[in-house]
Amino acid sequence: MNESIAQKLTSLKNALPPEVTLVAVSKTKPIADIMEAYEAGHRHFGENKVQEMQEKYEQLPKDICWHMIGHVQGNKIKYMAPFVHMVHGIDKQKRLKELNKEAKKNNRVIDCLLQVHIAQEDTKFGFDALEIQDLLQSDFQTKYPNVRVRGLMGMATFTDDESQVSREFKGLRSLFMDSKELLQLEHFDTLSMGMSGDYKLAIAQGSTLVRVGSAIFGSR
Ligand SMILES: *Cc1c(COP(=O)(O)O)cnc(C)c1O
């Protein structure tokens, strides 16, 4: 039996702890699929390409919270700055600076996450733990007043080895807790880790936000 998008979304939501945010990753999926999830009451959607997200933003209800989960290119920030809800993939200081500039032009303070490189593969972007600590100990808040760093994001190695994935998530959780303690900021509250294949492991390690695509919308 084929479950509908709404059914998959509902059973997934029921299985998540109530404090965990679900971002439904709708990249490559049509407007009709997103509307089905929207009509089932869902509001948080994730995309990995700025242009695609912008096109969908224009066609869809304006109370959707759009998450940019992909790798961010500096020259694309201006297109999402007017509406994006959270930018997950900030992987260098330069991006923070660019995001700050575009947020300011739009009179906004934009929420973002710092992407941490936790996987074994060297193809994945992100800061390492030392760079995170350096950045968080700097005066980034005064330098970039139009961005609000809400937490960390990471992607585990693409492997069947669950113990490795869990270890990577655990490491990110511990960096997140250390950062939280260092910063003492109420709004530093988001740890984005876990996708269709590994969200259960991520939640077991203390994720507060999962980014799930194919388990809701089907394979791409
Ligand atoms: C595509 C993507 C996801 C969702 O992947 P699924 O395996 O379909 O759940 C999550 N996070 C990022 C960064 C992605 O690019």
Image (cartoon, grey):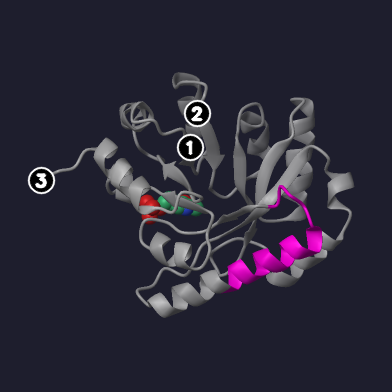
Residue 120: in sight, yes or no? Answer: no
- Secondary structure category for the residue under label 1: strand
- Measured Cα–Cα span from mark 1 to mark 3: 27 Å
Q: Is disc 1's CB within 8 Å of ligand 1? A: no
Contact between marks 2 and 1 (CB within 8 A): the answer is yes
For the N terminus, the quadrant is top left
Residue 30 figure quarter: top left
Q: Left or right: 8 with respect to 2? A: right
Q: Residue at x 89, y 54 (%)?
A: 139
Q: Left or right: 5 with respect to 148? A: left
With respect to residue 92, does 80 lie above or below? above
Which residue position is annotated with label 2? Answer: 64
Q: Residue furthest left?
A: 1
Q: Residue at x 46, y 62 (%)?
A: 203
With respect to residue 179, does 120 lie above or below? below
Q: Give yes or no for residue 176 being in the magenta stretch.
A: yes
Q: Residue at x 71, y 47 (%)?
A: 187
Between 51 and 129, the residue placed more toward the observer is: 129
Q: Is disc 2's CB within 8 Å of ligand 1? A: no
Q: Residue at x 60, y 67 (%)?
A: 173
Q: Left or right: 82 with respect to 17? A: right
Q: Give yes or no for residue 77 being in the magenta stretch.
A: no
- Residue 97: x and y in percent read 79, 45
- Secondary structure category for the residue under label 2: loop
Which residue position is annotated with label 3? Answer: 1
Q: Amino acid at mark 2?
A: Ile
Q: Residue furthest front?
A: 18
- What residue span does the magenta drawing correspond to? 171-188
Which residue position is annotated with label 1? Answer: 44
Q: Left or right: 37 with respect to 67? A: left
Q: Amino acid at mark 1?
A: His
